Image (cartoon, helix red, strand yellow):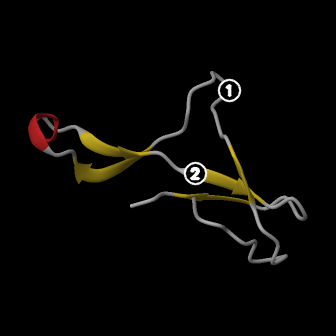
């Protein structure tokens, strides 16, 4: 896991889990088609963001490993 630093405070941000009110994990859907058969059927790539929060100021940021 990457160490993320808060751009406002400079302290290390803590990784946290973000879920919807229904308990589902968040996913980002791109315009890029999936590879293989699903991509040929029009399915788009889904990416799972990692959420970080600053313990000092409360800033929340999400990053996607590509």
The image shows residue 50 at horizontal and vertical percentages of 58, 51
- Locate residue 12: give its quadrant: bottom right
The residue drawn where x is 48% and y is 57% is 64
Q: Total marks drawn?
A: 2
Q: Secondary structure at mark 1?
A: loop
Q: Residue at x 34, y 51 (%)?
A: 30
Q: Is residue 63 above or below residue 40?
A: below
Residue placed under numbered mark 1 in the picture: 21
Image disc number at residue 50? 2
Q: Nearer the viewer, residue 38 or 15?
A: 15
- Look at 69% across and 56% down and name the residue there: 52
Q: Residue at x 11, y 41 (%)?
A: 36
* Mark earlier in primary sequence (1, 2): 1
**Crowding at label 2, few (<14), some or many (≥20) Cα neighbours within 10 Å?**
some
Disc 1 + disc 2, Cβ < 8 Å: no
Label 1, label 2: how far apart the Cα atoms are: 17 Å
Quadrant of res 62: bottom right
Q: Is residue 40 visible?
A: no
- In the rendered structure, the answer to whether residue 57 lies left or right of residue 51 reads right
Quarter occupied by the N terminus: bottom right
Numbered circle sitting on residue 54: none
Residue ranking furthest to the top: 22
| Residue 65, x across and y down, in percent | 45, 59
């Amino acid at each position: 896991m990457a160490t993320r630093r808060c751009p406002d405070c400079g302290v290390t941000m803590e990784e946290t889990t973000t879920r919807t009110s229904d308990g589902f994990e968040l996913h980002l859907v791109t315009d890029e088609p999936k590879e293989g058969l699903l991509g040929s059927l029009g399915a788009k790539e889904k990416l799972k963001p990692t959420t970080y929060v600053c313990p000092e100021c409360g800033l929340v940021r999400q990053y996607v490993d590509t």
